[in-house]
Image (cartoon, rainbow, N blue to C red):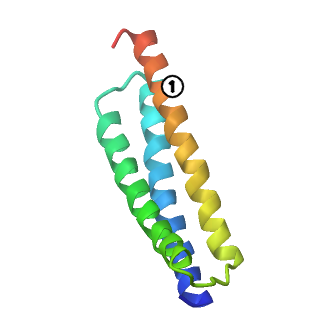
Amino acid sequence: MNKEELAMLGFEIVAYAGDARSSLLKALQDVRLGNFDSYEALLADADENLKLAHNAQTKALSEEASGTNLEIGFIFIHGQDHLMTTILLRELVQDFISLYQEKYGN
């Protein structure tokens, strides 16, 4: 895998993580307002996008694990940043949903 291919994986990770982040923030916004109708679908969408981002990340991990020396650039690192922060956001949003369910008696 060359640097350009690795950069494309980075862009892929950013795109999937960004879509997941949008779904998570929408779910949080909805439950904050007491709307619990759509959060499960939004969480499922976020989880699917996180899975796709993780699959893209795994391609690079597999390459390196097989002995390939990867020339990692800033774009791939940026993708890793997005993925890690979105995974953390997923966990926090789940906690906030639980708190709002308690608040609204759902």
Residue 90 % position (x, y): 49, 40
Q: Work out which quarter of the rendered image holds the C terminus and state it.
A: top left
Q: Is residue 82 above or below residue 62?
A: above
Q: Residues within 10 Å of mark 1 (few under 14, many from 20)?
A: some
Q: For this rendering, which residue is in front, 83 or 28?
A: 83
Q: Is residue 77 above or below residue 5?
A: above
Residue placed under numbered mark 1 in the picture: 96
Q: Is residue 42 above or below residue 99?
A: below
SS at circle 1: helix
Which residue sits furthest front? Answer: 67
> What residue is drawn where x is 48% and y is 73%?
62
In which quadrant of the rendered view does residue 78 lie? Answer: bottom right
Residue 94 % position (x, y): 46, 31
Q: Is residue 21 above or below residue 93?
A: below
Q: For this rendering, which residue is in front, 75 or 38?
A: 75
> What residue is drawn where x is 32% and y is 44%?
44
Q: Amino acid at mark 1?
A: Phe
Position of residue 38 in the picture relative to residue 87 (left or right): left
Residue 97 % position (x, y): 45, 25
In which quadrant of the rendered view does residue 54 lie? Answer: bottom left
> What residue is drawn where x is 71% and y is 75%?
74
> What residue is drawn where x is 52% and y is 70%?
61
| Labels in figure, total | 1
Residue 29 % position (x, y): 48, 34
Which residue sits furthest right? Answer: 74
